[in-house]
Image: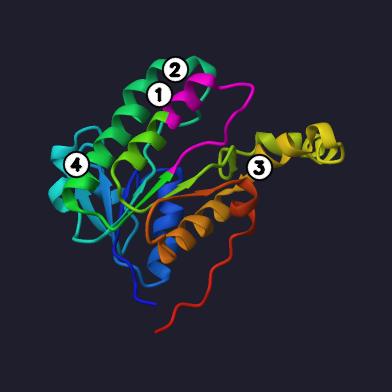
Amino acid sequence: MAAATVFVTGGTGYMGRALIELLLSRGHPVHALARPGSEAKVAKGAIAVAGDALDAATFTRAIPPRATLVHLVGTPHPGPAKAAEFERVDRVSIGAATSAAATARAAHFIYVSVAHPAPVMRAYIAVREQGEALVGATGIPATILRPWYVLGPGHYWPYLLIPFYALGRLFPGTREQATRLGLVTLQQMATALTVAVENAPSAGVRIVDVPAIQQAQLRTMAQ
């Protein structure tokens, strides 16, 4: 399998660093967008691109031809009180990323959305649904991942909910929701994103839900 050239927005963030390190270990050339002055935070081995994730004009020309664009920009620790920030950061950044990808003629667009529907976080889900619509409108073959909560450094409190998830999966009336809104780990997300990079759809939009994220497995890349 030929290595894919990957352009990552949000590459210095919680999910971005883990993904980039895995991609590099798999032989993929990686370009990572970082705010001016934060280039040193990009994982060693990746090419840092200074730009503003909210402004497509600052990074469109830096996207390599036929690259896979992975969009990871978003409000950290999202909660119901951050509705305005979802609009200002999440909504604007996916608009910029889809515009840049279309102009640069990216080969594959990967977007981390969120599991839906869900009984809480309606503002967050609404913005992510808008993001999914923007991704689909580009016409670029796309993969959309829909996790609910990603466990990892600084994100461990939901481990307390694991017994409730197990209980929910025992009963037919709550089994589907407990599965769809299940927890995934940071490593599972990095793996699922890498699998998406290495297995781009030929057309259309592919949805990867929580069970598929949990079960994602890397294959050995042909040299």
> Which dot, 4 or 3, sits closer to the camera?
3
Q: Is residue 15 above or below residue 190?
A: above
Q: Amino acid at mark 1?
A: Phe
Q: Which residue has dot 2 on it?
A: 83
Within 10 angstroms of label 2, few (less than 14), some, or many (20 or more) residues? some
State which tag comes first along the sequence, 4 or 3.
4
Spatial CA distance of label 1 from label 4 is: 20 Å
Q: Percent position (x, y) of residue 19?
A: 44, 56
Q: Is residue 197 magenta?
A: no
Q: Are marks 2 and 4 in contact (CB under 8 Å)?
A: no
Percent position of residue 103, x then y: 16, 46
User: Which region is colored magenta?
Assistant: 112-129
Q: Which residue corresponds to mark 4?
A: 51
Secondary structure at numbered mark 3: strand
Where residue 77 sits in the image (x, y, percent)?
50, 30
Label 4 close to label 3 by CB (< 8 Å)? no
Tag 3–tag 1 contact (CB < 8 Å): no
Q: Amino acid at mark 2?
A: Ala
Please give the residue where the numbered disc 3 appears in the rendered image: 183
Q: Which residue is mark 1?
A: 86
Of label 2 and label 4, which has the lower sequence position?
4
- Between marks 3 and 1, how big is the CA–CA gap? 22 Å
- Position of 186 compared to 196: left or right? right
| Pointer 1 with pointer 2, Cβ within 8 A | yes
Badge nearest the viewer, 1 or 4 = 1
30 with respect to 62 (left or right): right
The reply to whether the C-beta atoms of the residues labelled 1 and 4 are less than 8 Å apart is: no
Q: Nearer the viewer, mark 2 or mark 4?
A: 2
The answer to which of 44 and 53 lies nearer the viewer is 53
The CA span between labels 2 and 4 is 25 Å
